[in-house]
Amino acid sequence: MRLHGPQRVFVAAAACLAHLARPIEAQFPDSTPEHLNLTTIASPSDPTISISYKVPEGACKTAFDSQQQYTGWVSIPGDYPTNTFFWFIEGRDAKASSTLTVWLNGGPGSSSMFGLFNENGPCEVIENGTSRLTTAAREWGWDRASNMLFVDQPNQVGFSYDEATAGSLDLMTNRIAIPATTRPNSLPANVFLNGTFSSQNPLHTSNTTQTSATAIWHMLQGFLSTFPQYRPPAGNTLGVNLFAESYGGKYGPAFAEKWQKLNALQPNSTVTNSTTSIELKALGIVNGCVDDLIQGPYYPIMATKNSYGLAAINSVRAQMANASFYADGGCRDLITQCRSTVLVLDPTNSGTVPDVNQLCAKAYSTCNEDVILPYSDSGRSVYDIAALLPDSFPSSQYIDYLNTPNVQEAMGTRLNYTETNMAVYSAYVNTGDFEREAMVPKLANLLASGIRVGFMYGDRDYVCNWYGGEAVSLAVAESVPAYAPFAKAGYAPIIVNDTYIGGVVRQFGNLSFSRVYQAGHFVPAYQPNTAFEIFARIIYGTSVSTGAQINLSSYNTTGDSSASSAMDLPASPDPTCYIRNIAGSCNDQEQSAIINGKATFVNGALVTQSPTTSIPATTVVMTATTTAQLTGVFTATATPSNAATRGGVSKGDIGSVVAAACAAALLM
Ligand SMILES: *[C@@H]1O[C@H](CO)[C@@H](O)[C@H](O)[C@H]1NC(C)=O
Ligand SMILES: *[C@@H]1O[C@H](CO)[C@@H](O)[C@H](O)[C@H]1NC(C)=O
Ligand SMILES: *[C@@H]1O[C@H](CO)[C@@H](O)[C@H](O)[C@H]1NC(C)=O
Ligand SMILES: *[C@@H]1O[C@H](CO)[C@@H](O)[C@H](O)[C@H]1NC(C)=O
Ligand SMILES: *[C@@H]1O[C@H](CO)[C@@H](O)[C@H](O)[C@H]1NC(C)=O
Ligand SMILES: *[C@@H]1O[C@H](CO)[C@@H](O)[C@H](O)[C@H]1NC(C)=O
Ligand SMILES: *[C@@H]1O[C@H](CO)[C@@H](O)[C@H](O)[C@H]1NC(C)=O
Ligand SMILES: *[C@@H]1O[C@H](CO)[C@@H](O)[C@H](O)[C@H]1NC(C)=O
Ligand SMILES: *[C@@H]1O[C@H](CO)[C@@H](O)[C@H](O)[C@H]1NC(C)=O
Ligand SMILES: *[C@@H]1O[C@H](CO)[C@@H](O)[C@H](O)[C@H]1NC(C)=O
Ligand SMILES: *[C@@H]1O[C@H](CO)[C@@H](O)[C@H](O)[C@H]1NC(C)=O
Ligand SMILES: CC(=O)N[C@H]1CO[C@H](CO)[C@@H](O)[C@@H]1O
């Protein structure tokens, strides 16, 4: 569910008291304490914070069995309960285990389990026979270079929750009804499921990036004090890194700045009993929507004048979109008004001042409708200009996997899994969080204080496209006097291995901007090897071009002044209709078959639309990525002479065209 209209989440008043005493039914995860088997302790740093965790035996296959994992919840008191879910996986070798990377997906409202299972986690979901999903180690999982901590935030996203609440999920729309209810006659049984969810109460989550930043700092305090062995030692050259994707273009800079401020408030920057300083070394932004004031004008450019030679919409439409950005009372004006009002009336971004919320929400809806969404004329995915809708990449099978009883038991979750919480998304839309803050000054401060800032953008993404990302990188450099050489540094090849160039990078000192060839929005899903090398080089402080050791005070790349070399547009891939992403992955005909109860799914993927066909049993195990060499980071000694600059994911033939009207594009 990544690309469809704003879905209303219906939250009925808790009136259905008659059902209170019902027995636990099979559709709800078994949440008896013996079954969950969680260890719960008070946080060593703060007795009001508790941490419940366990080792998720068998739930995520790692390259080496010795890699420690924990799943758990950090519970923080407040006006409402906050139970923030984390999944920790230790790195593959000693070097990798000396640094810790926090990964955040965006949304707002999307779960970081999407990243773990579909992008850069240590494992991926594979099919084992006709009715079983399992996992295999992912060759280019980022645990190859770092300990990884995947966090579901803000509260109520993914496995994070306020109160575990019974409800029913309609898979046609992904709406959750609270309380659980009987199935409407119009729906077949396989698309209307009971389960346990967060309450969906919009007041039980943070509704601005700033409020989330503080919540996640407390969460990290709880995690690092409970597992001090995973806190990189003070003064270590490798410390804590924060990598965030998409809407994470806002989370990343705001969280990093907040954590630096909270560190500075401590009497001493080493460990104290009450708080642990988070020594942030690197901030990575993957296809981030950082600031519409800067990125807005690049939407019409990406739609019509991209390096793939694709005019996705007609040029008049694109010119109108561009003009609307600059028009009086248009996107640009409204963002500026929103921000100046925030500074006066809601400087802490509490989201509690109605006038500010309304103005900023209007700025977002205007930018979205007038500047961003004209692209939907094209019938193409906002995440990949090569893909016609429906775009089912990457797979939604991991959602089925996370809703199986044995996996839930291994993790110790009392909740069912949903990829995106629309109540949280709406809460952010309603405060206009999208437009509230200028992030470039925050990025500039981080850079000026010696933190590495790395931008990584897949070049087939529309929704947070690389032209806008490049403009952000230049704006950051312009704000830090020492970074004047950045704009003059040329684009060098990103050498991924002896024969492959994965993109181009501009780097000066601690700042880099990478354009990744042939990648859509979720870069590690499209180009796993290239994304991994860029990640590793950013956190290790090496040349993003070659992986070589460099002097971070003076190093710069050399090469072309422009990154816009031309690429061939691959054919649109064949979509797969997934039961957990019906609106986003199934065409009209498939959706009718589902509604009429004629669709059969195997491992969450549609196999037939005719009820009479029997599915042949198979024991074939889908093989995962080959895993010859599972450790190490590549360092180039030469530039490939005959480099294949196209490649990676083979996308198959042209899929069926479905012009889906999209009213909102989630920034996952
Ligand atoms: C919740 O998980 C259970 C397994 O514990 C599963 O049977 C049920 O279908 C899931 N419900 C939803 C809405 O995913
Ligand atoms: C509960 O977890 C502990 C380890 O934390 C394990 O030794 C024990 O066998 C588990 N109990 C059950 C019933 O799974
Ligand atoms: C596939 O399933 C079979 C039977 O349950 C099991 O023995 C085997 O280990 C599974 N393979 C993987 C890769 O999980
Ligand atoms: C789902 O829960 C509701 C409320 O408890 C119940 O009436 C309904 O029968 C349940 N559905 C199924 C398929 O068990
Ligand atoms: C912080 O604490 C360490 C160890 O106790 C001490 O050596 C150092 O001088 C302190 N620094 C400041 C700024 O107080
Ligand atoms: C502070 O930490 C030290 C060393 O871990 C411990 O001995 C002491 O009890 C702690 N003090 C408080 C107030 O928690
Ligand atoms: C977009 O509009 C601005 C303001 O009118 C103009 O300066 C600019 O050239 C336009 N850009 C494109 C690509 O048409
Ligand atoms: C945002 O959250 C705050 C604190 O819970 C709440 O007072 C405010 O009404 C919320 N804003 C909106 C627009 O819902
Ligand atoms: C180099 O990387 C590309 C892209 O990931 C891959 O297709 C190719 O097999 C790799 N070659 C070697 C020699 O590892
Ligand atoms: C990059 O950061 C390091 C410290 O982390 C610092 O020594 C170096 O001077 C910085 N580079 C620039 C160009 O500021
Ligand atoms: C790194 O470059 C800076 C600035 O040019 C220089 O002062 C410093 O000596 C260099 N460091 C090393 C180890 O070469
Ligand atoms: C702008 C800038 O600093 N350019 C330098 C990049 O590095 C090369 C050497 O590798 C210098 O020659 C450039 O002057």
Image (cartoon, rainbow, N blue to C red):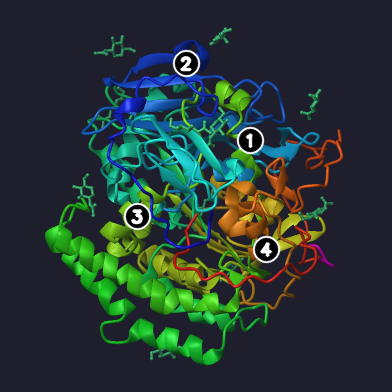
Could you give the CA–CA distance between mark 1 and mark 2, rounded to whole angstroms?
21 Å
- Disc 2 secondary structure class: loop
Pick whichever of labels 3 and 4 is earlier in the sequence: 3
Which is more N-terminal, label 2 or label 1? Answer: 2
Which residue does the numbered mark 4 point to in the structure image?
589
**Label 4 is placed on what type of residue?**
Gln
Residue placed under numbered mark 2 in the picture = 38
Percent x, y for residue 133?
71, 34
Q: Secondary structure at mark 4?
A: helix
- Mark 2 residue crowding within 10 angstroms, few (<14) / some (14–19) / many (20+): some
Residue plotted at (26% across, 75% down): 334
At 29% from the left and 37% from the top, the residue drawn is 263
Residue segment shown in magenta: 639-643
Amino acid type, callout 2: Leu
Q: CA distance from mark 3 to mark 2?
A: 32 Å
In the image, what residue type sits under mark 1?
Tyr
Label 2, label 4: how many angstroms apart (C-alpha)? 45 Å
Q: Which mark is residue 426?
A: 3
Disc 1 designates what residue? 401
In the drawing, does residue 146 fall left or right of residue 276? right
The answer to which of marks 2 and 4 sits earlier in the sequence is 2
* Nearest to the observer: residue 141 or residue 535: 141
Q: Residue at x 71, y 60 (%)?
A: 575
Answer above or below: position of 268 versus 634.
above
